[in-house]
Amino acid sequence: MNFLIELKNVSVTYKNGVDALNDVSLKIKDGEFAFVVGESGAGKSTLIRLLTREVKADERADVKSVIKVNGFDLIKMKQRDVHKLRRTIGFVFQNFMLIDSMTVYDNVAFVLRCIDAPTKYIRKRVPQVIGLLGLQEKINRYPGELSGGEQQRVALARALVNNPQLIIADEPTGNLDPRTSVEIVKLLKEINDRGTTVLMVTHEHELVRRVGGRLINIRKGQISFDDLI
């Protein structure tokens, strides 16, 4: 079985002494969709930062930790190679993180330009993904001219444009109304159906219950629940 994410016996302790994660083990299969929930301070953000190598796991002589994401060994990874990992991940944030001075097209194309993708490919790929998210008619609009739901669709297009193996959506519906939130999750589900693994962090338990799927609950730095609902 192919696991896109694999954690084993992982702990993270910050310099101020806070135990953010405590002996966490987790496996997420290639092509899976999983929700991560938990109260503020439970360890959700630390888990995401761990998967993107923003933080490192504690080094313990008595326990061998494992952190593998998209085929990368994050325990052995050198800092100069972190960008290679992050290129395989698409990110979606609560606050959209769009560039206000750029059109929808340029916001999405920005990701490909950063990795020096060929101009011909950009011109083909960007409209394709924008169309997939139903934004064809908004392609020359600026973020300020879009609704919150439309802005999040642009963020999804940007996350998807580089064909990532994994999409991490960190509270992507936090600034949206309930109806739009469901629409965004359905879009993530559609992206998942096309083969992309999706890990969505949320505090909206009702939304998770409504949509259903794998639920990973983090409580006080540990996984307290991991099952289908």
Image (cartoon, rainbow, N blue to C red):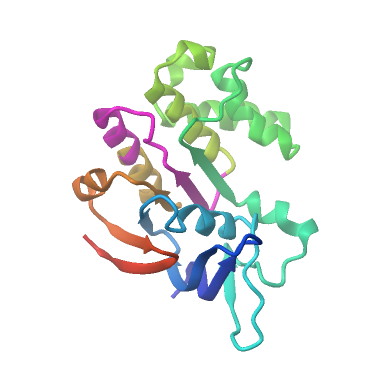
Examine the rendered structure and indicate whether residue 191 appears above or below residue 224: above
State left or right for residue 3 relative to residue 119.
left
On screen, residue 91 versus residue 78, left or right, reads left
Q: Which of 32 and 229 is in front in this view?
A: 229
The residue located at (63%, 60%) in the rendering is: 16
Q: In the picture shown, does residue 169 fall above or below 42?
A: above
Magenta stretch encompasses residue 25: no
Residue 32 is situated, as x and y percent measured from the top left of the image, at: 38, 59
Image: magenta residue range = 163-185
User: Which quadrant would residue 49 be assigned to in this image?
Assistant: bottom right
**Quadrant location of the N terminus?**
bottom left
Q: Quadrant of the C terminus?
A: bottom left
Percent x, y of residue 73? 65, 70
User: Percent from the top left, x then y, of residue 212?
Assistant: 23, 52
Residue 86 vertical position relative to residue 220 in the rendered view, above or below: above
Q: From where the camera sits, is residue 117 visible?
A: no
> In the orientation shown, which residue stands out farthest toward the bottom?
62
Q: How far across and how far down the image is residue 39, in percent?
A: 36, 52
What is the tally of numbered marks visible in this picture? 0
Observer-nearest of 35 and 138: 35
Tell me the residue at 44%/70% (across/down).
Answer: 27
Could you say which quadrant of the image residue 119 lies in? top right
On screen, residue 95 versus residue 59, left or right, reads left
Residue 186 appears in the figure: yes
